[in-house]
């Protein structure tokens, strides 16, 4: 299951919105923040994964300047998540 949702993080003066992907695996949820490849976290439950995502984002945005943060002050108007299958090069492809 892939769940993508905007995640709001309050940073004392403003709220910032981030698109976060929660991917269910055999050992819980893996979490990725769209646009921030270096933010990776996880949790045993969806709630725990969201908590960890909020903590990781909150820590990361401390390093961003005001102009960078301005990009995240409006929630996205639409989110689409889709699981796609990719065949490796050279694999049996349908003709």
Image (cartoon, rainbow, N blue to C red):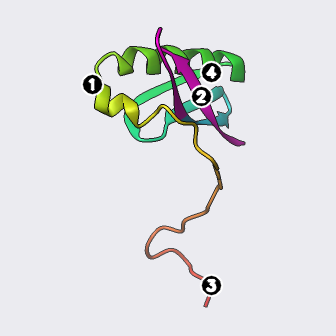
Nearest the eye: 43 or 6: 6
Magenta stretch encompasses residue 5: yes
According to the picture, the residue beneath numbered tag 2 turns out to be 7
Q: Earlier in the sequence, mark 1 or mark 2?
A: 2
Give the secondary structure at mark 1. Answer: loop
Label drawn at residue 65:
1
Magenta stretch encompasses residue 17: yes
Q: Earlier in the sequence, mark 1 or mark 4?
A: 4
Q: CA distance from mark 3 to mark 2?
A: 40 Å
Q: Earlier in the sequence, mark 3 or mark 2?
A: 2
Tag 4–tag 2 contact (CB < 8 Å): yes
> Which residue appears at 48% of the width and 40% of the height?
34
> Which residue appears at 58% of the width and 43% of the height?
76
> Which residue appears at 30% of the width and 25% of the height?
66
Q: Earlier in the sequence, mark 4 or mark 2?
A: 2
The stretch in magenta equals: 1-18
Which quadrant holds the C terminus?
Answer: bottom right
Tag 3–tag 2 contact (CB < 8 Å): no
Label drawn at residue 82:
none
Nearest the eye: 82 or 13: 13
Q: CA distance from mark 1 to mark 4?
A: 24 Å
Q: Quadrant of residue 60?
A: top left
Nearest the eye: 95 or 50: 50
Q: Whole-percent x and y of residue 22?
A: 62, 34
Nearest the eye: 69 or 6: 69
Q: Earlier in the sequence, mark 3 or mark 4?
A: 4
Characterize the local packing of mark 3: few (<14), some (14-19) or many (20 or more) Cα atoms within 10 angstroms: few
Characterize the local packing of mark 1: few (<14), some (14-19) or many (20 or more) Cα atoms within 10 angstroms: few
Q: CA distance from mark 1 to mark 2?
A: 20 Å
Label drawn at residue 50:
4
């Amino acid at each position: 299951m892939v769940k993508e949702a905007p995640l709001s993080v309050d940073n004392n003066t403003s709220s910032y919105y981030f698109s976060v992907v929660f991917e269910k695996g055999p050992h819980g949820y893996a979490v990725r923040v769209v646009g921030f490849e270096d933010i990776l976290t996880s949790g045993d439950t969806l709630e725990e994964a969201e908590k960890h995502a909020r903590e990781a984002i909150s820590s990361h945005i401390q390093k961003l300047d005001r102009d960078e943060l301005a990009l995240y002050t409006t929630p996205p108007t639409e989110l689409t998540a889709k699981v796609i299958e990719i065949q490796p090069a050279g694999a049996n492809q349908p003709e």
